[in-house]
Amino acid sequence: MQSNGTHPDSAALLSVRGIQKVYKVDGGELEAVRNLTFDLAGGELVCLVGPSGSGKTTLLKIIAGLMAPTTGEVLLESKPVTEPPKDMAVVFQEYGRSLFPWMTVRANVELPLKNARVPKAERERLVEEALAAVGLAHVPRSYPWQLSGGMQQRVAIARAVAYQPKVLLMDEPFAAVDAQTRADLEDLVRKVWKDLGVTILFVTHDIDESVYLGQRVVVLSSSPTVVQEDITIDLPAERDQLTTRSLPRFVELRNHVYEQIQIAKAGARTGAGTGAAPAAEAAAGA
């Protein structure tokens, strides 16, 4: 099931190469991430999973240019990422804290476009297209606090895609919604991905979600973190919640990812970590 996505590719849109992150703590140094290397091709949807405390949030901050690695580099179109790049957007787990409650849905989606000095006519077009893409064309004048949690997360996704990023980073965006809403939002992500052609790196704790969404699943080890396995998800391109999750191949892939997570948690890999993960996540502000 191993893919070749962990190996650097000069044609990749996004490259993570030899990332290490060491924090200074009271007891000296804490190595949260040891050596992470993988690539995303343009238009790929890749899910990232790992045990709690495996450095997923740390890695996402580094990829987004919000945190510097100790060693290694992130490349976007072969250019080093040293600050938040304009061709990248992030959707966070805590959608309630990322939206401005005093602004309408339209104003929230439009805000990054205003900051980028996009002309008004172009802003209006992009906002309308983004709201239509996430099924919110009927509520542009509503306020976030008037919407359900699932609809608020749709607003956050619309704001990200309106910016027309080449890469969309999603940090456990559905962790705070109920199971039915989560399924709807998973299908929404796949629709947005196919319709807009954006490259997506999707971080999740949910193994079933990772297999359902992704073309690949990158499994992280326990901290200090390396890529434990990069798994190709060879399910049909067209997926739905009932049919796809009932496929024998889905069950097989899901079980394989689960097995890898259990191995990572047990530290049963070459060069396994020593259980410093919770402190690493605390140091990262996860």
Image (cartoon, rainbow, N blue to C red):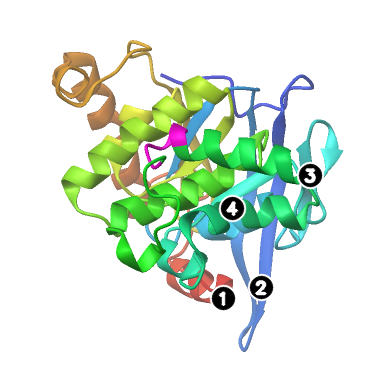
Q: Is residue 149 left or right of residue 77?
A: left
Q: Position of residue 222 (x, y in %)?
A: 45, 54
Question: How many marks are shown on the rendered structure?
Answer: 4
Q: Which residue is mark 1?
A: 283
Q: Which mark is residue 23?
A: 2
Q: Secondary structure at mark 2?
A: strand
Q: Which mark is residue 60?
A: 4
Q: Which residue is mark 3?
A: 119
Q: Position of residue 15 (x, y in %)?
A: 71, 35
Please tell me whether mark 2 or mark 4 is closer to you in this view. Answer: 4
- Using the numbered discs, state the Cα–Cα distance from disc 2 to disc 4 in whole angstroms: 16 Å
Q: Position of residue 231 (x, y in %)?
A: 44, 25
Contact, mark 2 vs mark 1 (Cβ under 8 Å): yes
Q: Is residue 210 above or below residue 245?
A: below
Q: Is residue 239 above or below residue 260?
A: above
Identified by mark 3, the residue type is: Pro
Identified by mark 2, the residue type is: Tyr
Q: Is residue 216 left or right of residue 15?
A: left
Question: What's the magenta region?
Answer: 132-136
Identified by mark 4, the residue type is: Leu
Residue 50 seen in the figure: no
- Using the numbered discs, state the Cα–Cα distance from disc 3 to disc 1 in whole angstroms: 41 Å
